[in-house]
Amino acid sequence: MPTKSKHIVFNKRLYSIRELVECIGVTEWFWRSQIWDGKLPFIQVGKKMLIDRRDLEVFIEKHKMQY
């Protein structure tokens, strides 16, 4: 029986922290710490923090490493 692979498709503009955890991985606290440290911009809507896909792409590019 073939295993289901989880493909990440960024087809929305804004993502909640929970959605980032489900799609990309790492923990909710990791994403929150990146926001609190000013490394990842966010949009505040009520109590909810939303991440713009464009800012996430910039964040990923900034943190790429190569050995």
Image: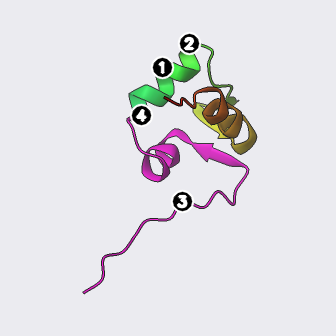
Label 1: which secondary element: helix
Q: Which residue is mark 1?
A: 33
Give the mark toward the camera: 3 or 4.
Answer: 3
- Residue that extends furthest to the top in the rendered view of this protein: 37
Residue 60's quadrant in the figure? top right
Distance of label 1 from label 3 (alpha carbons): 22 Å
Q: Return the disc, 1 or 4, that comes first in the chain's sequence.
A: 4
Q: Is residue 41 above or below residue 37?
A: below
**Which of the marked residues, 4 or 2, is nearer the chain's N terminus?**
4
Identify which amino acid the numbered label 3 is placed on: Ile
The residue carrying mark 4 is 28
Residue 48 in view here: yes
The quadrant in which the N terminus is found is bottom left
Residue furthest left as drawn: 1
**Residue 46: mark:** none
Residue 8 got which mark? 3
- Gap between marks 2 and 1 measured at Cα: 6 Å
Picture residue at 39% right of the left edge, 38% below the top: 26
Q: CA distance from mark 4 to mark 2?
A: 14 Å
The reply to whether residue 45 is visible in this rendering is no
Q: Is residue 48 magenta?
A: no
Q: Main secondary structure of the magenta part?
A: loop
Q: Amino acid at mark 2?
A: Asp
| Residue 9 left/right relative to 41 | left
Numbered circle sitting on residue 37: 2
